[in-house]
Image: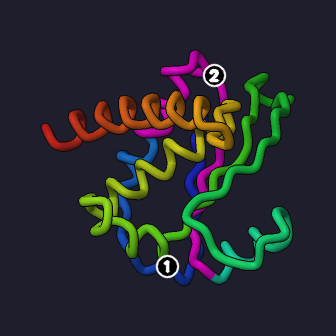
Amino acid sequence: MMIEIQKEITITHKINRDMLIFAISETLSELDNKDSDITLRLTDDEEMRQLNTSYRNINQTTDVLSFDQDLIDPETGHLYLGDVIISLDRAVQQAPENGHSLDEECAFLAIHGTLHLLGKDHAQEEERQQMWALQDRIFKQVLDEFRSR
């Protein structure tokens, strides 16, 4: 498994990369995808709005986007699931609303985005309940791990 983290150079927030990697790894493990690779990009609202407009035709920012790739990397033989992009501007705003630190909010969004790459969705109520329960369980594992450190 390879998890690459990219950070927009204009972003000044310090983020716990270990927590993000653990959150994504736990999500992949939970759904039996330990040999899958993902890129996580931390960006700002401006880039997020551009991506959301270009790929979803929605001219506004959002907290997290996922872009499926589902390609086999010829060098590693691993499945490259795709990209998860998180707006740190949105995470900074949402963290206190959700009772999270910035690191926790980013980990939660990384879990959410990774679940989308793994085919989970929340368009229908039944799907939403299943996805929310799964992301809450994984997030609790992340919190338990990092709050005990």
What is the crowding at mark 1: few (fewer than 14 residues within 10 Å), some, or many (at least 20)?
A: few
Q: Nearer the viewer, residue 49 or 14?
A: 49
Residue 69 horizontal/vertical position (percent): 82, 41
Check disc 1 and give the amino acid type.
Answer: Ile
- Residue, far left: 148
The answer to which image quadrant residue 14 occupies is bottom left
Residue 100 in the figure: left or right of residue 12 = left
**What residue is at 59 percent from the left and 48 percent from the top?**
4
Q: Secondary structure at mark 1?
A: loop
Give the residue pinned by disc 1: 11
* Residue 128 magenta: no
Residue type beneath disc 2? Asp
**Could you say whether the residue bearing mark 2 is in a helix, strand or loop?**
loop
Residue under numbered circle 2: 35
Residue at screen point 48% across, 72% down: 90
Which segment is the magenta one?
Answer: 23-45
Q: Quadrant of residue 94?
A: bottom left
For the residues labelled 2 and 1, say whether their Cβ atoms are less than 8 Å apart. Answer: no
State the image coordinates of residue 17 (x, y, percent, origin top left): 41, 53
